[in-house]
Structure formats: structure tokens, C-alpha cells
Image (tube, rainbow, N blue to C red):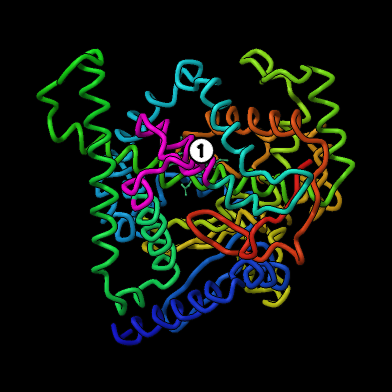
Amino acid sequence: MSPLYSACGIILLALTLSHHFRNHTSLAHTHTLFLTYGLTYQTSLLTHRLTFTSCALNTKHILCTAFTDFDSSPLRKPLFTPITPHGIFTLDGLAWKRSREQLRARLSNLRRTIDLSLCEEHFRAFLKHVPPDGGVFDAQRVVFALSLDLQTRFSLGESVDALGEMQSEEQRRFLGDLARVKERIVRDGFRGPLRHFEGKGAFWRACARVRGFVVERVRRDIEGRRSGGVGDGVGVPEEEINQSADQALSILLANDSMSTTLSGILYCLAKDERVVTKLRDSIVDSIGLEPPTWAQLGGLQYVRWVIQEAMRLYPPVVLNARVANKMTTLPTGGISSTKNNTNTTDSQNIPILIHPNEIVVFSTWSLHRLDPSFGPDPESFYPERWETRNPESMPGYIPFNKGPRSCPGQHYATIILTYLVTRMFQTFSTVTDYNAGPWRERISMTFENADGVLVGLS
Ligand code: HEM
């Protein structure tokens, strides 16, 4: 096969992906193909083959059973290197393991890491952006700023004050640059090789400014801790500063997941008065109107179900991909040579051969709707479905992924989300829906409604 033929295949594939990304139809397109061809299908453009799956067995295989057969870095490294050259998103193998260990140290002992009084401070800043008497506001924009404030406090030791009125010019510029960097990384991810046709000067400059801002704060934070907060803690090696900056940037890049979840919760609640009433009653009956304590957070069962259900319907990471690093297989979804090729269902249990360097895309969005383990009416928002289901033991439920590379911020995120949702519904008892149409996908670093999430809280 000539290299030119192969290159044309890659470019045609990139054009198709890029077309759906631009038209906000990536999810609808892949979902329709799952409904037409089965939970796992392959598409081929000239020589280039892509496998798509929304099958729990195959996803579990990629993320857990055959974890070492698949890499992330071939897809992510070229995109993330300008901003985090050694960040966890760009790594695989031993280097990834080391980076993961460092993050684990940072995200363990959450009682020490999370200061609930700071969460309360940020929640009160959020309240200032909620118009009185149930007036409309774009909750997606406001919770995005709220999670940025929380995440910068966590990763940089100081909040960028995205919700505040006292934001400095430097902070404003940092947030603008960070948004531009993320937007370009995601767009380039969908464009594949076509990304090389657009100049990168502005992107690189924005990356350098974002990194400079983070390095400065990380240095100050480390030096402050070394000197016990009294004077100059000199002599921190540059390597250590750069490593911590990569870590802080990776956490910041993962930030948007929190805001997608909060937006998804408010969007679903705006359409379901029954759940809003039950949610508020469940909170007030068990802990009253005072901010929750650490001990109380774990007992707010209905809050947990609401969060889990919103993450099922609006998972922050909707599409994901891995690249095979050797000849390997997926356990099911292949086509038997003795069967009619148009009647492909994964129930045939025929493995699929995956060649080295082939990409497998898995759709969490579709998996969360098509996997039978969620019970009847999977399109509807029904928190009670979690009464008889345990998210830990369901291979089809993967908002945080599963296996060695699952989200290391899962427990941190769950605590913060539980705190914020509890405070919101101690404060408000009605969510008014001002959204004119259905959720229109916009895939950014995570997942958004292209039209915003327009609600009123009273
Ligand atoms: C609702 C909130 C969140 C959701 C749904 C979520 C989801 C995910 C998912 C699906 C991945 C796997 C991506 C992949 O390998 O392809 C991931 C990775 C990651 N998440 Fe989260 N995340 C959330 C919040 C957070 C928070 C708050 C932090 C940090 C404090 C965080 C830090 C990370 C990091 C560093 C990785 C990369 C892990 C690795 O590559 O080993 N996440 N997250």
C-alpha cells in the first residue's frame, strides 16, 4: 500500500471527524452508527481503520484487562506538549506511573486537602451571580468560573477569582489564555493532520504565558512552604518547579469536568420538579440548613444519586480513544464470516483483531445510554435507578473511566460536588427552565451545551 494512499485515508478521516466537530454532530453521528451497526463497528477510509465501541465488555478490556496493550500518548502528546511537556496527559508506561504516584500523594488524605470553609467561601461567591426571584442566568458560565476558582486554589495555592469583582489584569489574561489553549487543543484533536494547516504562533505564545503564570505561583508556593511561610525559601531546583507546574497544569486542564457535571445537574433538575423537591427534602430532613460537615457528606444518599445520574446522561468526557501498541484484540463485536455482515450485534462474542497503531474510540455518551445494565428508559433522568445499582461494580458506568488510568480526582470531585449541590438546594427550592431547546453538544476539553444552561434559582 503506498504511503500516499495511506496519507489520503488519514486526511479523509480527519475531514469527516472535523466536519462533525464543527457541526456539533459528533455524538449524534457515532450514536446513530451504533444503533445501525451494533455496539462496536469499524470504519475504514482507504487504508486507515478506526474502531468505535460503546460496548461495556470492550471498554472494560481496553481500560482494565488489556490496559498495557493500549496507549494514550500517541494521540495526546502532540496536542498537550506545548503546555505540559511532561504532564500526565502526555505520558504512558513508566513515566506515567511515576507521574501518577506523585498525583496520588497530592490527592490522598482529602480531609487535609479539602477545606470545607473555603468551599463555602466559593459557594457564597457563586450566590452573588444568581439573579434574585428566579431570574434567568447561564449556569454553565457561572459554575465554570466557580470550579476554576476552586481548582486554582487547589493546584496553585491561590484562586484566580473568576467569580470575583477584584480580578487583576494578570488573572484576566491568564484565564483568557487558558481558554484559548484548551480550545485549540480540542479542535486540533478532531482535525488530526489537518491541524498543521493553521499557524500556531498565537497558540504557543498563549501556552508560554499560561505556563509562566503557573510556574511563578508554584515556585512561590514551594518556597513559602520550605521557609515555613516566613521569608525566602531559596534553592528549589528548577526540575522540581517544572514538575510541579506540569502537575498543576494537568489538574487545571481536568478542571472543566467539575463544571460539566454541575451544569448537567442543573439542566436535568430544571426539567424535573419532582426530583428538585425530593432532593431538597432529603437534604433538609437529614442535616437541616447548616453547611454540611465532613461526617454528614457521606450520608447524603439522594444527592449522590442525583450526581451519578447527571454524570450518566452528561458525562464530562463523552468520547475517548486509545492506540494499540501491539497486535491485540477486543473481546467482542467481530463479524463472523458465516453470518450476514449487516446483522452485526455484539452478542456474537466474536473477537476483533486490532493491529498495532490502530485507534479505538470509545463513546461514554453512547455506552451510558445503550448498556442494558441501566434498566428501562435509559434516556430519562431518574436518580432512583441507583437505589439498586452500585456504580463501582458496573463496567458500563464510566464517567471517571475505570482501571489503572481512571480519574485520580474522582473522590476529590465527588466531595466538592456533594458539598456544592447540598448548599445549592439548602438555599433554593425551585429550578426554572429557560432553555429553548435540547442540549446541543459542544465538545470542549470536556462537554458543554453550545447554547448554555439557562436556568433560574429561587
Ligand atoms: C466530575 C468530575 C470529573 C470527572 C467526571 C473526571 C473524569 C475523568 C476521566 C474520564 C479521566 C480519564 C481520561 C482518560 O484517561 O482518557 C480523567 C483523568 C484525569 N483526571 Fe479527572 N475527572 C473529574 C475531576 C477531576 C478533578 C477534580 C481532578 C483533579 C483534582 C482530576 C484530575 C484528573 C487527572 C490528573 C487525570 C489524568 C489521569 C491519568 O492520565 O492517569 N479530575 N478524569
* Secondary element at image label 1: loop
Could you say where residue 320 lies in the image, as x and y percent from the top left?
51, 56
Is residue 178 left or right of 31 when viewed as pictured? left
Three-letter amino acid code at disc 1? Gly
Please tell me whether residue 448 belongs to the stretch shown in magenta: no
Q: Is residue 64 visible?
A: no
Residue at horizontal 76 percent and vertical 26 percent from the top = 301
Please tell me whether residue 163 belongs to the stretch shown in magenta: yes
Could you say where residue 190 lies in the image, as x and y percent from the top left?
45, 69
Category of crowding for the residue at label 1, using alpha-carbon neighbours closer than 10 angstroms: few (below 14), some (14–19), many (at least 20):
some
Is residue 433 positioned above or below 304 on the image?
Answer: below
Residue at horizontal 58 percent and vertical 47 percent from the top = 142
Task: Give the residues drawn in magenta, as a range.
Answer: 145-173
Front residue of 445/428: it is 428
Could you say where residue 192 lies in the image, as x and y percent from the top left?
38, 71
Residue at horizontal 55 percent and vertical 29 percent from the top = 411
Is residue 41 left or right of 381 when viewed as pictured? left
Q: Is residue 44 visible?
A: yes
Is residue 172 positioned above or below 204 on the image?
Answer: above
Residue at horizontal 33 percent and vertical 81 percent from the top = 7
Front residue of 350/152: it is 152
Front residue of 93/219: it is 219
Could you say where residue 135 lies in the image, as x and y percent from the top left?
75, 50
User: For the view shown, which residue lies furthest in the left direction?
Assistant: 235
Is residue 367 left or right of 156 when viewed as pictured? right
| Residue on which disc 1 sits | 403
Is residue 247 left or right of 47 when viewed as pictured? left
Quadrant (top left/top right/bottom left/bottom right) for the C terminus: top right
